[in-house]
Image (cartoon, rainbow, N blue to C red):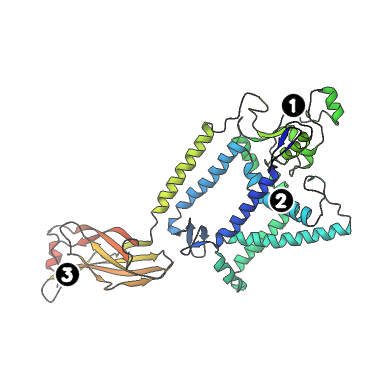
Amino acid sequence: MSEEKNGITIPTPWRIKRYYIYLFSTIIALALPWIEVEGNHFFLLSFDKLKLHLAFVQFDMQELYLMPFLLMLIFLGIFGMTVMGGRVFCGWVCPQTIFRVIYRDLIETKILGLRGRIKNKQKEPDMTKLENKVKKVVAVLIWTVLALIASADLLWYFVPPEDFFAYLAHPADHMTLFGTVIITALFLIYDIVFLKEDFCIYVCPYSRVQSVLYDDHTVMALYNPHRGGDIYDEHHNKNFTAQKDLQAFEPAAECTTCESCVTVCPTHIDIRKGLQLECINCLECVDACTTVMGKLGKESLVTWSSDYEIIDQKGKTQYFRPKVLAYIGLLVGISIILGLMGSKKEHMLLNINKENRLYAVERTAGGKVQVDNAYEFLLQNTENEKLEFFFEVIPPKGMEGKIIIVKPSKEFSAVPGIKKKKIVVLRTTEMLVDDLRKDTIIPITIRAYAIGHEDKIVVFRKSTFTFPREDILNAAK
């Protein structure tokens, strides 16, 4: 809730809004793997069962052509977010930031009191005290439990919870899975407890990419030197060490040099230096300056705005400029393509390979000549239940009913996820083509379907039926 002080409205701190986003993101990340619709997950890339679940629809690994579009959506979304709002992803969505807030602000500060207060992130605890050493150990133990949960949660998007806990009963048979959980948890412990924000500054490549994406209208945390005064020169050397020095040089400067915006910064930068790659747009400095300046009845000197509006003072920030609209257009276009391709999911997969022998010819007891063509059908049931399947031949117009399936003679079952190989024989006893010189290739269509689900679980595949030339027919015994 916003409040009013000295005629200035103090909005709800960005930190509190971030906490709500963090809570929402955490709940979604933990809950999604457990939600199933007809046995399908929202997202599951199972290398164990060679399945992809996307938006509660199950796809076979042969349909992984959807993944590039999904990855494009993610990266274009992050890049578009950066063009519009700087490293807002880092400060508001990134798991690294969320985990650090949980460990530093919640566990160390609020629960254990190891740190003095949330608003001072520069002052490290005095680890010479035994009490603080004990608290540190407790903090690491608590985070170890949370790291194991976070690691398991990550794996649930590749191994569903129902299988994960079944495998848990036999860890010796699934050492790769549990080794991954342990290694990921150990990395999270090192990263969050020891590496800290150095990961954002030195390890994460995103901070280097962002500088290419920024433009004059990119929104970020910015200090207003026109009101606050120039604290640093063009080489980032500090001009003043105290408020009186600043006031002597720039009488109109409003900055109190209280350093609140500095002490609260998780990446240990001074926002008054200007744009810095280390800034993750968490807006803690905006909250700090808003509180200090609000007590003086003034607007904050640090705001979430753009160079165009604050530094250059050329006018209002243009949020929906051509570059942003281009990203929105790409995201909408790729989403439509992904939706259309995903809606054409095949509920069964079928490959047809003709045998090397073109045909087999023999004369029946009734004197007719029969021609057989043999094929190898490789079928896979991509549903979640055992189903019965059969085939149908669709010959060219005028040949209806003249080519029939003689093998298999009845429907057969196929369980999910297992490829079923069937030898299929097509036969004709009719004179389909009268050609003296060469064999004739007749185009046919194979219709494969699940019994009782003919309208939904059905695929059509093109193939050929080879009919021999006349001399081979006449020579049949």
Q: Residues within 10 Å of mark 3 (few under 14, many from 20)?
A: some
- Residue 426 horizontal/vertical position (percent): 23, 67
Residue furthest right in the image = 129
Q: Specify the quadrant that holds the C terminus.
A: bottom left
Total labels: the figure holds 3
Disc 3 marks which amino acid?
Answer: Gln
Mark 1: secondary structure: helix
Q: Amino acid at mark 1?
A: Arg
**Residue indicated by mark 2:** 101
3D distance between C-alphas at marks 3 and 2: 78 Å
The quarter holding residue 312 reads top right
| Residue at numbered disc 3 | 370
Q: Which element type, helix, strand or loop, lies under badge 3? A: strand
Which mark is in front, 2 or 1? 1
Q: Is residue 451 above or below residue 150?
A: below
For the N terminus, the image quarter is top right
Answer whether residue 270 is visible to the viewer in this image. no
Tell me the SS state at disc 2: helix
Work out whether 304 lies above or below 124.
above
Q: Are marks 3 and 2 in contact (CB under 8 Å)?
A: no
Percent position of residue 181, x then y: 64, 63
Where is mark 1, residue-wise? 227
Residue drawn at point x = 44 percent, y = 49 percent: 338
Residue 132 picture quarter: bottom right
